[in-house]
Amino acid sequence: MIIRPIRWIRRFHHDHKGVAAVEFALLAPVMILLYFGMAELCQAHMAHKRMSHVTSMVADLTARAQTVTRNDLNDIFNIGNPIMEPFPTTPLQTRVTSLTRDNAGVVRVDWSFGRGMTPRTGTVNVPSGLILNGESLIMSESIYDYDSPADKFLPGITKLNRTYYLRPRVVNQVLCSDC
């Protein structure tokens, strides 16, 4: 009677018929999670690239002007809507600011206009060596709150932002008559 259970255990120990199914059951959830994670990462990267393009375009078009108005800036911001497609534009917040560095080396806001962001006032810190005393600069900033399933597990990880600095192209300082 003792021989039968030992023979059964030996037979079970050497039987490998279900190993592949068990391995698949263990690895499939991990592989599926990696696949969807990579797909979501690629989508977030694409949204970040498009948001960056909008930010640079706002700075570039503003830096090309001699003067701008609020209507001009609204039109420039509206150009960003087709660039963001197929992503929604509602979470996109953009601001453009004209800065001048005074003789004391302090960078001050000349004017600022934003959509979804409060216009800047006062002084701003810019990277060192970017402008000299008496020079002007256009700063464009964007924030995009990318909606992702990862937000449920890692909140705040999908808040994308970008800042661009460009020198005015035609004049020393771009003026805004009603900002």
Image: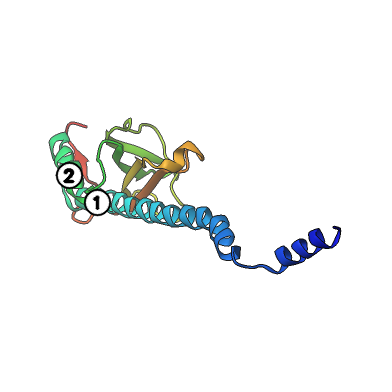
Q: Amino acid at mark 1?
A: Asn
Which one is nearer the viewer's eye here, 71 or 83?
Answer: 83
Residue 47 point in image, percent of width and height: 32, 50
For the C terminus, give its image quadrant: top left
Residue tagged 2: 76
| Res. 172 mark | 1
Q: Secondary structure at mark 1?
A: loop
Which one is nearer the viewer's eye here, 146 or 148?
Answer: 148
Residue at the far front: name it: 1
Q: Amino acid at mark 2?
A: Ile
State the residue at coordinates (17%, 44%): 76
In the rendered image, the vertical position of residue 113 relative to residue 164, given as above or below? above
Q: Earlier in the sequence, mark 2 or mark 1?
A: 2
Residue 57 point in image, percent of width and height: 23, 52
Q: Secondary structure at mark 2?
A: helix
Judge whether residue 155 can be spotted in this image: no
Judge whether residue 32 can be spotted in this image: yes
In the rendered image, the vertical position of residue 27 relative to residue 91, given as above or below? below
